[in-house]
Amino acid sequence: MFCPPPPTRPLLPRTTRVLRLFRPHHHHHPPTLPLRRRPPPDHLPHRCELRPTHPPEPIRISRTPPQRRAPPAMRPVSSAEEVGALLSRSDSSGRRRRSSPVQSASPRPAGCGCGGPRRQSSFRDDVGHAASETYLVTRLTFSLLQYLGLGYRWMSQLLALTIYAILLMPGFLQVGYYYFFSSQVRRSIVYGEQPRNRLDLYIPKDINRPCPVVAFVTGGAWIIGYKAWGSLLGRRLAERGIIVACIDYRNFPQGTIGDMVSDASQGISYVCNNIASYGGDPNRIYLVGQSAGAHIAACALIEQAVKESSGQFISWSVTQIKAYFGLSGGYNMHSLVDHFHERGLNRSIFFSIMEGEESLSRYSPEIVVKQSSSQTIALLPPIVLMHGTEDYSIPSSASQTFADVLQQAGAQAKLQLYEGKTHTDIFIQDPLRGGRDPLVEDVLSIIHVDDEITQEKIALAPAPRRLVFEWQLQLARRISPF
């Protein structure tokens, strides 16, 4: 028989049990042992048992499946603060960040031949990592577009960028394969506790002695910068015996310029203090920045020189940097506001990136150098500014003016102009073309200025092969939104 629950207690929700007991044909069949039933949940105040007076027949139990709750509707992001809060909960791989302390890789055991730690990973892990990295970049892009709004100018720029990427896709795929699957690349090494505090290391194949090191800060208009953008330069320099550390940092709206400079400085500190365990020479570290990365790296370098000259606590010394290379950078934000606005970077957004119009002087290396003491200037390493004469994203006059200010202040500064080169020619199209690369050759001539043996090896090394057809490079050059 069915024993209902007491009236003060409702029946269990979502589950209905229908018990059908059939009597046997022979009523004289002797009774059998009682049918045991699983005890009810603890929250019921009593128990029920079924004790049939006739032999039990199969019991059919039908359960109505629970109804699934519909997922909550996605709410559009309405402000930069909400986007920053959303992105700050994820790390560079798209996963939620743990609250555990920063972990750094330990050196590899002796005999590995690479002089640094190496993480064993499977093909499945590499594919998963590539997917998570792609997801992060895509999410940041759509979050940015959602914040900015899809106006005509932004739509046209986005379309040009898409066509530009499609034209150069054959080369990007080959570089991407090297980035994700080469054993010479150590990806996403943690250098800090903030989101995107990661860096990639490109290590030469044969390390017989400590190698010179390049700490590279990538560009991206302070909005779409990412450490993987330096994979082409990292590969070229690693093939010539140089360890390259590509430093990632928070972008807008995930962070403002102060966060970017702080992240870059912390990444440089990690390189200075830990690169020896990877086979690098801590006394031969060179700082390189490209586009917005050149501006961020220059801010970090000069800020560190100011701290060091005033006796403040520092985690790395400017004297550890042998030289600074600024590629296609801008160094006076006041003179670039209107230019960026005409190019599509709205004035109000640019002020938000720079933490307000009143902060432009603070984050303009050119102005900071004018206001710095002679002790600060004396600490700066040799500075080499490189720029294409047909650069429309950041005019070459930005580097020319900064070089003049540095020389007037007493710093060692050199200007290298590339005739007829655009913003992306010296950094993307020329390396994809293969053969002689003027930018890489000029950087190597300074890094190996006192190493004649290495210079001879580089001169005899085979030239890099072409990755993209010439017609694709020429068409991409015309369509490029940069």
Image: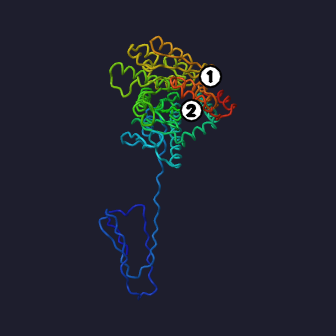
Q: Nearer the viewer, residue 323 or 386?
A: 323
User: What SS does tag 1 mark?
Assistant: loop
Mark 1 vs 2: CB contact within 8 A: no
Tell me the mark number nearer the camera, choosing from 1 and 2.
Answer: 2
> Which residue shows up at 68% across the image and 33% down it?
469
- For the C terminus, which image quadrant? top right
Location of residue 59 with respect to 359 vertically, above or below: below
Residue under circle 1? Answer: 421
> Which residue shows up at 45% across the image and 59% down it?
66
What amino acid is at disc 2?
Arg
* Residue 144 percent location from the top left of the image: 51, 33
Q: Residues within 10 Å of mark 1 (few under 14, many from 20)?
A: some
* Residue 306 percent location from the top left of the image: 38, 19
Q: Nearer the viewer, residue 43 or 249?
A: 249
Would you identify the image quadrant in which residue 459 lies? top right
| Residue 315 appears left or right of 158 | left
Numbered tag placed on residue 470 in the rendering: none
Residue at the farthest top position = 408
- For the N terminus, which image quadrant? bottom left
Q: Residues within 10 Å of mark 2 (few under 14, many from 20)?
A: some
What amino acid is at disc 1?
Lys
Location of residue 44 with respect to 152 vertically, above or below: below
Location of residue 232 with respect to 391 vertically, above or below: below
* Residue 430 percent location from the top left of the image: 62, 28
User: What SS does tag 2 mark?
Assistant: helix
Residue under circle 2? Answer: 236
Query: Which badge, 1 or 2, is on the more N-terminal residue?
Result: 2
Would you identify the image quadrant in which residue 191 lies? top left
Label 1, label 2: how far apart the Cα atoms are: 19 Å
| Residue 124 appears left or right of 14 | right
Residue at the farthest right position = 471
